[in-house]
Image (cartoon, grey):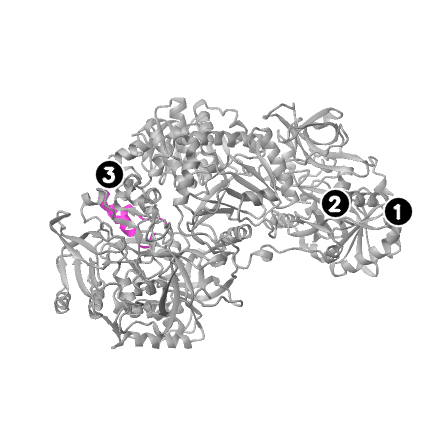
Amino acid sequence: MKYSLYNLVKNSFSYHENWEKAWSSPDLKPEYDVVIVGGGGHGLGTAYYLAKEFGVKNIAVLEKGWIGGGNTGRNTTIIRSNYLWDESAALYNHAVNLWEGLSSELNFNVMFSQRGLFHLAHSVHDMQEITRRGYSNYLNGIDAEILNQDQVAKKIPHINVNGRYPVLGALLQRRAGTARHDAVAWGYARAAENLGVDIIQNCEVKGIDISNGKVVGLQTTKGSVKVDKVGLVPAGHSSVLANMAGFSLPINSVPLQALVSEPVKPILDCVIMSNSVHVYVSQSDKGELVVGAGSDAYNSYSQRGSFDMIEHMMAPLVELFPIFSRLKMLRSWGGIVDVTPDRSPIIGKTPVKDLFINCGWGTGGFKATPGSAHVFAETVFRGEPNDIAAPFSLERHFSGALVDEAAAAAVAH
Amino acid sequence: MSNQNRTIYGGKVNREKPINFVFNGKSYIGYQGDTLASALLANDVHLIGRSFKYHRARGILTAGSEEPNAIVQLGLGARTEPNIRATEVELYEGLEASSQNCWPSVNFDIGAMNNFLSRIFPAGFYYKTFKWPPSMWLFYEHFIRKAAGLGQSPTAKNPDRYEQKFYYTDITIVGGGISGLLAALGAGRSGCKVLLIDENPELGGYLLDYNFSINEKDGKKWLKKIIEELDGLANVTILKRTTAMGYYDYNYLTALEKVTNHHVEFSNTLPRERYWRIRSKKVILAQGAFERPLVFADNDRPGIMMASAGQKYLSRYGVLPGKSVVLFTNNDHAYLTAFEFVEKGAKVTVVDTRDLLNARISEKCKLLNIKVFKSYSVIKTYGDKKVNRIEIQQVDKNQNQLTGEVENIHTDCVLMSGGWNPAVQLFSQSRGKLKYDLKINTFVPDKIIENQKIIGSNNGQFNLQENLNESFEAGIAAANELNFNSVEKVNWTGKEEIEFTHSDVEPYMLGKKKVTKGSKHFIDFQNDVTAADIFLAQREGYISVEHTKRYTTTGMGTDQGKTSNVNALALMSHIHNKPVDEIGHTTFRPPYAPQTIGAIAGRSVDKLFDPVRKTSIHEWHVENKAVFEDVGQWKRPYYFPQNKEDIHQAVKRECLAVRNSLGILDASTLGKIDLQGPDAAKFLNMIYTNAWSKLEIGSCRYGLMCNEHGMIFDDGVTSRLGENHYHMTTTTGGAARVMSWLEEFLQTEWLDMKVFCTSVTEQWAVLSISGPNSRKFLEDLTNIDLSKENFPFMKFREGEVCGVKARIFRISFTGELSYEVNVPARYGRYVWEKFMEHGKKYNITPYGTETMHVLRAEKGFIIVGQDTDGSVTPSDMNMDWIVSKKKEDFLGKRSYTRSDTVRHDRKKFVGLLVNDKKTILPEGSHIVEKALKQPPMKMLGHITSSYYSPTLGYPIALAMLKDGISKMGEQVVVPLMNGKIIEATVTDTIFYDKEGKRNNE
């Protein structure tokens, strides 16, 4: 049943007793053309585009827990594409373009809200960095405005521009914003299932069957399954899956925490990011401040972090917004992020034939969801990455052709 | 009439001490010892706020930290705080509070029309609509945002202060009720260090509200004795008004103490709240339990509250919330409250879901003239802003349906009790596993992970007699396990008139049809989640508990589901016809209760947010009007304006002074690391790209540090001071990173190397003098022979400067004859002033970082982090000469043979001269292949440094340019955002003194 205001009103007369399942829980079939391992936004989206754009009929998404329960449901929902390098800009901007039509495409409101993102600059060096990135964005056709201190103070009520590290300016991307993270997983799941994709929850992959260098099947907690192609999209456990297939990844898995405040009436209508003072914050539609910052310094697979990281989020938040000091932190949580040496993802082929991987999104995968899923679907279908995905091969970690987004933020004098 | 609901006697409020307060603009009087909630109830105020989604009238549901409904905006101006639970606010003189989420007033709230439209607003309705047209979402969202939220954020800076405290203890006990107190006593008597935390202003918990006897004594008298003994134990610390918030790995707890929140006057000396960070060898959880609501249609009206809350308001505060009371229960225990209410003059009717009743209770009900409807359920309530009537109907449990006539009861207060849920939040945070207990129908602790005990009702144990002894013994055992002496066991005997033994969980027995046909059986009060919403979520496939939670938002309010979770899970269990254990539960996350952001930030605010680092010469710079820039944590003089100069004029003057005579720079912020040990040279060979084995004592060498990918990440000059002794310098911003980098390799990779690294950045003041007159100038002030022959370029000498022991490095970042004079930091300003005085005849000119940048750019010297960005190799910077071809290994080496690193068309470091000789290219602008009217344009590189060169009289720029070396002399274009296109010519990177004569003078 189509989601619309009309149907919502219509169903209200029958007390909403006739809505169908957004997705069902079919049994695992013995054989699939393509199996996607990982039921987050990236994995579900991959299945959706494989079915929708490439006409693949027999697809399953295997999720060891509940769909959207990994980093899709644990992030701070920020979406932007103002990346420095051409390769990243192309990938993330492809995502933003898809975000803009996603609610219509999926017939599910993912609440993509382009409320603008301010990347704050606190030093001469920061100003050089945002200018360089702003120019790079501009020349790549991505919207970018470089603002001075007065403009920032005017556009962001209540921000403290004269703190320990004064705000000297900001890089503004107006097309950036936030979305409702859970809705992305649910929307893709519903749309994928409408196209015949089997979504199997509580199904953990325990082994990968390889014959003559080609993937042929998977061992799961719900039995074994034969496959023609496999796409691994298991954020937080990429290395574990890669090890099952007999290769290793240049990835460190670390906890990343985020938190929300109690809900309050609208007080912040844009997204704020600061690398130097180190916090990012926006206000959700529910009214909660959604806050994030750095990842924990140790490797872990447990989805919990240490308290000092929370402290290191709150002090910068109060530094930038002294008015938030009396608000209350309501809930904090952790996710596991897979970090590559250059902080860019790995999308593409693996040493195993017909086994593809999409991982290593580090702390910023949510924003890329539709773009990542879209280019990965094509990679899985054609067996080769397209132009956007190609620079993100696993191979680059051997050749040295890194896409180092962290590099640009280096500080020195 | 004031305090009309106050009983004539009873309660623990001090009726001699009236307190004035204001709610929604109206003045009221309460008493010392009241909470805001009890004082409002005493004054017959039941309507406290409006709910999140439907703006339904809401009152007071509980009497504690689990309150979902009675949340208010507390205080005014900069001290206002939203979403404060009225049930926890201790009344103080002049308190002002108001209702939230209502307009224009809580009595007449426009938003309440949502309630009438609620039929089209079921759970998740927003996922199904507002999608068309896409461009309109921001418009719809604007109104959604306005409708959402609860209270208002302050809009001024918080004037209050918060503190943090670190604490180490043997045993931390969370909860100061019967169990916690006895555990504290058991552990305390053995002599170990005990910290007892309780969120209330008064210890005793449940004992304060209910009557019973211990050791044949009145419970309250017994309590007083226990507390007296604990107060007398020096090894026991008691924190009241303190909520344990987080339980992290290895018994690390966080707790928030309200220090002055309840004070009349704001304190200048005390913090408002104190954040405790506690590391404890053992933890005993004794947090007790929360009473569980019952789920029936319109169970959310003001006047409907938990039985235990009614009990507390009556017995502790002397407030009778209603005169014609209905108790709706599924267990024996709640009858205690019915009896108490009758005793204080209320008329009580009981609606009990069960058909068999304990004979003793039956008898007492008869005696007190309490009518009991057995096997009945409340099926609906009425009353606009307060409950005034309920409907009840008989329950056929076997058929799971309602039968018989609907009966009406007029009432002004409904007390409900659905049993008790242990407060397992902290236990779960500590990774403890829960199991579902079929006797009391709730989750109870099962498997403990941390070094921890959990006791009393917190452990699902509600028998007083057993709790008394087990709790005391748990305290003794905990101390024993930490090797403290055993103390004698005590045999306590306790008796409660009626004990809580078991209860069903039965939100669903109220008739399935009723649940879904548009009536509102609230599960989560604050977030307006009804039973129908839970049904809808299951119907639509949001079956995992996490999906149900996220889709319906149940348990996501500011109470974090303390009253709603178990009912939601039980309903899901009913719908799927599966045991609750199989449904599972969501993860409990810190904090236990909302905690103040400012308290977590603690003192890391304002000036203390991050320490400011200043050189020993800093104050001189301030006195001489330097403009500063932040470089890392350091404040560095950016330039020294004279006579209203702007930055350009000042920098021009400073540059020319250095080139023509003498300049002086405070370079103390440069990172300095002292390296000692027999393997120091070997270590440097691995860390730097060039060779260090042959560096002689007394010589200096420039080095590049690269990461494993072969990319430059720091640079500096390292000098050999002695046989096994080196002095390394780093960039200012990179100092800490380099130090960690060295230590990481020494500690994790090259364990056999004998090298010690010591940061000496702050031990030395560095005065860099530069310019053609620097030798002449310095000769007068030092005993070191500065002659060209005896102290050539790239050498180091020790001696005295201005009578102070000094190290002089003859190195240059300006291209001029230069000396970096290092003196012990405490002499920095002294020597600086001597220099300024003596340098007058050379017109000595202090210069800042900007002049330093310009001078080095004229010479083509790189600044790591500005000209490099972590993606460039030494070769990219035309510095192949610094990469050893002979060394067997060094960090980065393996990467120089990688296919991408040896690519010929990599970006290279070049100079640029603008053709108009006027325009200063913006740093960060890009060179494009072809300038087009509109982006996108293909980029070839970017401008890394760009200045007006006072020495040359025209602008110069440095850039990274694709295949730049082969483009020497070619024309390039740089489009600006304002549409202008700048043309420039590619040159080499050295603009001035290409032969390098000047610094060799």
- Mark 2 or mark 3: which is in front? 2
Q: Which residues are magenta?
A: B561-587
| Cα separation between marks 3 and 1 | 96 Å
- B938 relative to B242 in the view: left or right: right
Residue at 56 percent across and 28 percent down: it is A141
The label shown at residue B646 is 2
Q: Nearer the viewer, residue A2 or B705?
A: A2
Q: CA distance from mark 2 to mark 3?
A: 72 Å
Q: Quadrant of residue B353?
A: bottom left
Task: Judge the density around disc 3: few (<14), some (14-19), many (≥20) Cα neighbours within 10 Å.
Answer: some
Is residue A47 at all visible to an observer of this figure? Answer: no
Task: Using the image, name the chain to which the residue with label 2 belongs.
Answer: B
Between the C-alphas of marks 2 and 1, the distance is 38 Å
Label placed on residue B788: 1
> Circle 3 sits in a helix, a strand or a loop, which is it?
loop
> Relative to B676, is A231 on the left or the right?
left
Q: Nearer the viewer, residue B747 or B616?
A: B616
Tell me the element at label 2: loop
Residue A372 % position (x, y): 47, 31
Horizontal arrangement in the rendering, residue A235 relative to residue B882 (left or right): left
Q: As displayed, is residue B412 above or below residue A180?
A: below
The image quadrant where one finds the C terminus of chain B is top right
Residue located beneath label 3 in the image: A15
Cβ atoms under marks 2 and 3 closer than 8 Å: no
Q: Quadrant of residue B368?
A: bottom left
Q: Amino acid at mark 2?
A: Asp
